[in-house]
Amino acid sequence: MEFDERVAALATKVSNQRDAIQTEEAAKNAFVMPFISMILGYDVFDPLEVIPEFTADVGTKKGEKVDYAIMHAGEVQILIECKQPRDPLKIEHASQLYRYFSVTNARIAILTNGQVYHFYTDLDAPNKMDTKPFLIFDLEDIDDTLLPELRKLTKEVFDLDSIISAAEELKYLGQFKRSMAKQFEEPEDEWIRFFAAKVYEGSLTQKRREQFRPIVAKAASQFIRDQVNERLKGALHANPPKQATGGHPEALESEEVALGDVARDTEVDTTLEELTGYQIVKAIACSDVKPQRVVGRDAKSYFAIILDDNNRKPIARLHFNGKARKYIGTFDADKTETRHLISSLDDIYLHAEAIRVAVRAFMGDGGDKNR
């Protein structure tokens, strides 16, 4: 598999097994060791590449261990410390990493709970691990822009100089993005003052700030939604399919998509992008069945598209919950899902035949156009 496919496969594994993982040891075996082998490409059973329970006595701290040390060119290059699954990662959890960093040749330290990985180096002072990570990688919310940097740490292309040189930009870029996201959700006074000064000429009293706070948050949310909608409309209009095979109308444009025939988990927020993707799949399937038989069901981890509102008749799945990476899942005759990376909603049409084959598998040979 390609690098991004290996990352996607491990992300699926984490999503499917996370609730069953209750201990640190279980997280190591189920998630961290596959991360080292599948993603970074090191042999976890070769002590010349990966040393579990790595020990290097530090001052008065004798016998302390780091969970894994990764070797490259005969030297320790990466240290990994694992913590309890689902626990938030904090620098206080990295005491062993902090001490070991200064007494080994390692320039990269990783703190993880199996799902989230914090990457540290020594930007602030030589041979002293920074207190803030330069990269945060979350397998439940993959940021596609970080994959090229992560790949530099793999065995096949190990490029420490390149990732260290990019680390400072990555560090501040990540912090800026997280800060912006926080401001969008819960704007602070400085954020409110900045925007209020652009539109309000009166005195910005405490009462006015509290009045503007929810308005600023709402404006930020609507701005992002508008930007997403514009991109969706642009994608649909850039190369609009004329008609699905069999004379059925194409998918509705984004502003026309409705929730009428979508069943949802009450805790799930169905996005406009998912609804538009659903309508595209539905239009493709209409070459073989009547549109009312194609039903959407939204859940936490994916949007399912099924025949006759029957979970045993899967047509496709939309994996659109990642931050940047989107996939469509198609099914073979054995109902085995294959996920395909898509760069835009238009790419769904590249898998039209697989969607029709899935429908026909439940209809018998020759399809079922009249029912």
Image (cartoon, grey):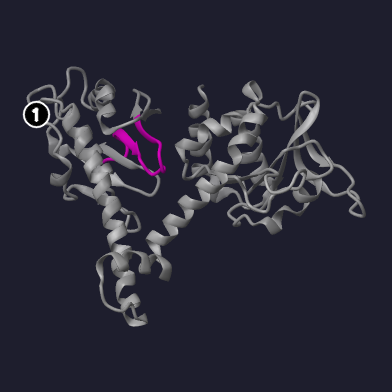
* Residue closest to the eye, 14 or 324: 324
User: Is 181 positioned to the left or the right of 308 in the image?
Assistant: right
Residue 68 against residue 214 in the figure, above or below: above
> Which residue in the structure is indicated by mark 1?
248
From the top left corner, tell me how far across and down residue 62 is, in percent: 91, 51
- Residue 188 appears in the picture as rendered: no
Q: How many marks?
A: 1
User: Is 357 positioned to the left or the right of 116 in the image?
Assistant: left
The segment highlighted magenta reads 310-329
* Residue closest to the eye, 329 or 292: 329
From the top left corner, tell me how far across and down residue 226 is, in percent: 24, 50
Which residue lies at the image location 33% right of the left edge and 37% below the top edge?
Answer: 318
Say whether residue 259 is magenta: no
In the rendered structure, which amino acid carries the disc numbered 1? Answer: His
From the top left corner, tell me how far across and down residue 284 is, in percent: 19, 28
User: Is 370 positioned to the left or the right of 136 in the image?
Assistant: left
- Residue 298 appears in the picture as rendered: yes
Say whether residue 315 is magenta: yes
Which residue lies at the image location 17% right of the left edge and 17% below the top edge?
Answer: 366
* Residue closest to the eye, 362 or 140: 140
Residue 344 against residue 67 in the figure, above or below: above
